[in-house]
């Protein structure tokens, strides 16, 4: 009996590992189809002024609605896309969706807001990254000031000098950049000081624990650092009025989170903006 159970446990473990590998392979194979069959879309989440609640810009988030797998979360398919050389193609689709939205609003005479797209390291370091961006916004007739780039601090660890150079090219071309998930990547503060970025996004893991004294000290330090470097600090993942109150008290004036708006479809966002403007 014991032997049988051990056997089952072993095969269970094996199947589990097997399933994981299979699922990953399945996702890799389906990513190519998904690209061909246009299964990617975006949701958009406002960035708001924490004092007035007013929307000042947006973040576009990739969504994959697979007929076979259902809604696959970015936390699952983005790492697979990064490891299988598909991320650049996916992010170009995200970019096109964002620019199409801005173009439509522009044509309809509606207010435009800057929209940030998330860019993976591979895409960021691609030799034609900035040149392609410039060309694409031009094709859509959208000013570079309406497109922003979010990138995690790990780019600085890959190749700091090259990263700095690309941030400078972006700035020169009129694209503002944000450091995403700040606080998670152990980046050196003197590195941050040298990068021409305009926004630091404080990772949600700090905001969700902001009621603890140690975490609050960290967040306060990041907010002060950003202010000293003439950057905006923006809190990710604000869910409660308590978190909001603390953030305001320590001088953090911008944020995103379910407390204000969940990520939503472009149509849903259009109706919210229409309502606000009437
Ligand atoms: P991120 O860039 O830090 O985006 C914020 C994530 O937090 C989003 O998850 C958003 O839906 C979620 N979020 C926003 N407010 C709240 C809140 O109040 N509470 C909670 N619990 N979550 C909140 P999502 O859309 O699942 O995306 C996860 C991550 O996937 C993103 O984190 C980003 O790193 C990555 N990602 C998404 N789209 C892209 C893309 O086009 N390219 C790349 N490279 N990464 C992407
Ligand atoms: Mg982001
Ligand atoms: Mg983030
Ligand atoms: Mg995050």
Image: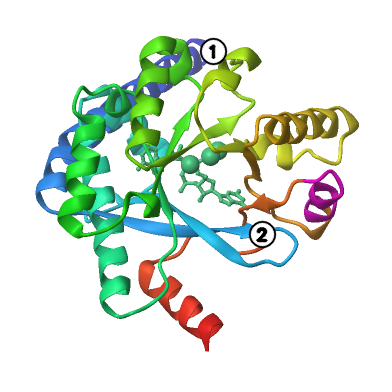
Q: Residue at x 32, y 27 (%)?
A: 124
Mark 1 is surrounded, within 10 Å at the Cα level, by few (under 14), some (14 to 19) or many (20 or more) other residues, namely few
126 or 209, nearer to the observer: 126
Q: Picture coordinates of residue 54 (x, y %)?
A: 63, 67
Rendered position, 213 above or below 103: above
- Relative to 175, is 81 on the left or the right? left
Asked whether 177 falls inside the magenta stretch, the response is no
Question: Image quadrant of residue 24?
Answer: top left
**Sooner in the amino-acid sequence: mark 2 or mark 1:** 1
Give the residues in magenta. Answer: 243-251
Residue 1 in view (yes/no): yes
Identity of the residue furthest to the front in this view: 172
For the residues marked 2 and 1, what is the alpha-carbon distance in whole angstroms? 62 Å
Residue that numbered label 1 is attached to? 2
Identity of the residue furthest to the left in this view: 36
Q: Secondary structure at mark 2?
A: strand
Rendered position, 152 above or below 36: above
Q: Picture coordinates of residue 205 (x, y %)?
A: 67, 35
62 or 80, nearer to the observer: 62
Identity of the residue furthest to the bottom in this view: 278
Q: Nearer the viewer, mark 2 or mark 1?
A: 2
Rendered position, 246 above or below 272: above
Q: Is mark 1 within 8 Å of ligand 1?
A: no
Q: Is mark 2 within 8 Å of ligand 1?
A: no
Residue 49 disc label:
2
Question: Image quadrant of residue 2?
Answer: top right
Q: Picture coordinates of residue 76 (x, y %)?
A: 39, 36
- Relative to 131, is 9 on the left or the right? right
Cβ–Cβ under 8 Å for marks 2 and 1 = no
Residue 250 disc label:
none
Residue 8 in view (yes/no): no
Q: Residue at x 74, y 36 (%)?
A: 223
């Amino acid at each position: 009996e014991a032997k049988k159970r051990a056997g089952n446990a072993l095969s269970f473990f094996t199947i589990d590992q097997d399933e994981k590998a299979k699922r990953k392979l399945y996702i890799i194979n389906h990513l190519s189809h998904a690209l061909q069959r246009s299964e990617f879309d975006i949701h958009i989440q406002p960035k708001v002024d924490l004092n007035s609640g007013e929307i000042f810009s947006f973040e576009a988030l990739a969504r994959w609605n697979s007929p076979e797998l259902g809604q696959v979360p970015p936390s699952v398919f983005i790492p697979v896309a990064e490891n299988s050389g598909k991320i650049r193609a996916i992010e170009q689709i995200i970019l096109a969706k964002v620019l199409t939205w801005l173009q439509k609003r522009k044509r309809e005479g509606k207010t435009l807001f800057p929209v940030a797209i998330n860019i993976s390291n591979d895409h960021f370091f691609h030799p034609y990254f900035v040149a392609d961006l410039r060309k694409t916004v031009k094709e859509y007739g959208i000013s570079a000031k309406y497109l922003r780039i979010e990138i995690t601090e790990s780019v600085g660890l890959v190749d700091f000098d090259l990263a700095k150079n690309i941030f400078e090219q972006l700035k020169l071309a009129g694209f503002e950049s944000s450091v995403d998930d700040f606080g998670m990547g152990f980046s050196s503060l003197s590195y941050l000081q040298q990068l021409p970025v305009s926004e630091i996004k404080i990772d949600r893991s700090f905001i969700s624990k902001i009621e603890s004294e140690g975490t609050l000290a960290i967040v306060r330090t990041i907010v002060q650092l950003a202010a000293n470097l003439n950057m905006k600090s923006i809190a990710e993942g604000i869910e409660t009025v308590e978190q909001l109150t603390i953030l305001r008290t320590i001088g953090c004036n911008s944020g995103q989170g379910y407390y204000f708006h969940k990520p939503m479809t472009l149509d849903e966002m259009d109706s919210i903006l229409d309502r606000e403007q009437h």
